[in-house]
Amino acid sequence: TNTMPTGEVLKGLEICQERNVFEFDGEFYRQKKGHATGQKQAPPVACQGAGIVEREFLNTPRDIVFDESNKVMSRPIDDPVFWSVKDMAEDWSRFIDDVLVLFKGDKRMADWFFKKLNGLYEDVQFKWEFSSESAIFLDIHLIFNRETKQLETKIYGKPSNKQLYLNYRSSHPPHVFKGLVYSEALRAVMICSRKEWSVDYLRTLRDKFLSQEYPEQLVNEQFQRALEVDR
């Protein structure tokens, strides 16, 4: 077969990790830990590493129980109620190394939960935020509607994201521009749980495309096409 032996793959990854040399402002530097941003192998390696941490963590014994006071009481590890920390999470969803946890408990319990997670590997540390009102996961802003007891979603954009889309005068086939406008509009329609939220976002998106010299008719047609999709 043409399959590369596992040993050679591991040796190649080791070279990529240990020889991250780059130049900045006339000086040469070497990154000592991790894979450099932009390397092709970095995302799958990060995903694999996060998966290893995830499997080990979710099978970690939960040898404590929280009562209504501020005390944490020990419990025998053979008590089936406390076999794993997994019972503290209603849902654990991960994309590469970004994790969304629907947690069952209060802030005090979450502190213990993530302290346990970050105690597994010194070089793998998760930054986390706890909220009973809303949360950000990737490009989604999740909102907990306590009146309807439903989870609502809208698009989230980082403040640093200037949405500088491909200029219409660049040398690309026509279908590329149509596809770009449609896919961005469809993303808004699919993510936003309320139509008024998607329409508001499309107004901003429309201005961004027009500023990059996209024909108004093209933008309007692709937006309308996206709005007709049943999410």
Image (cartoon, rainbow, N blue to C red):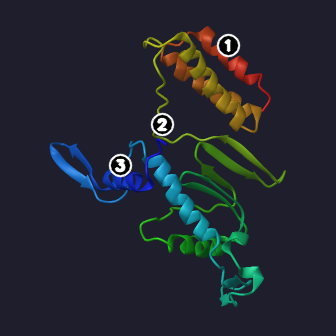
Q: Label 3's element? A: loop
Q: Would you say 208 lies left or right of 5 here?
A: right
The residue that label 3 is drawn on is: 36
- Mark 2 vs mark 3, CA separation in Å: 22 Å
Q: Earlier in the sequence, mark 2 or mark 1?
A: 2
Q: Are marks 1 and 3 in contact (CB under 8 Å)?
A: no
The answer for how far apart the CA atoms under marks 1 and 3 are is: 41 Å
Give the label on residue 161, or none. 2
Above or below 60: residue 25: above
Q: Quadrant of residue 57?
A: bottom right
Q: Residues within 10 Å of mark 3 (few under 14, many from 20)?
A: some
How many marks the image carries: the answer is: 3
Q: Name the residue: 38% across, 46% down.
A: 37
Circle 2 packing at 10 Å, graded few (<14), some (14-19), many (20+), is few
Q: Secondary structure at mark 1?
A: helix
Q: Amino acid at mark 2?
A: Asn
Measure how far apart labels 2 and 1 are at the Cα level: 25 Å
Say if residue 110 shows up in the picture: yes
Q: Residue at x 42, y 42 (%)?
A: 40
Q: What residue would you read off at disc 1?
A: 221
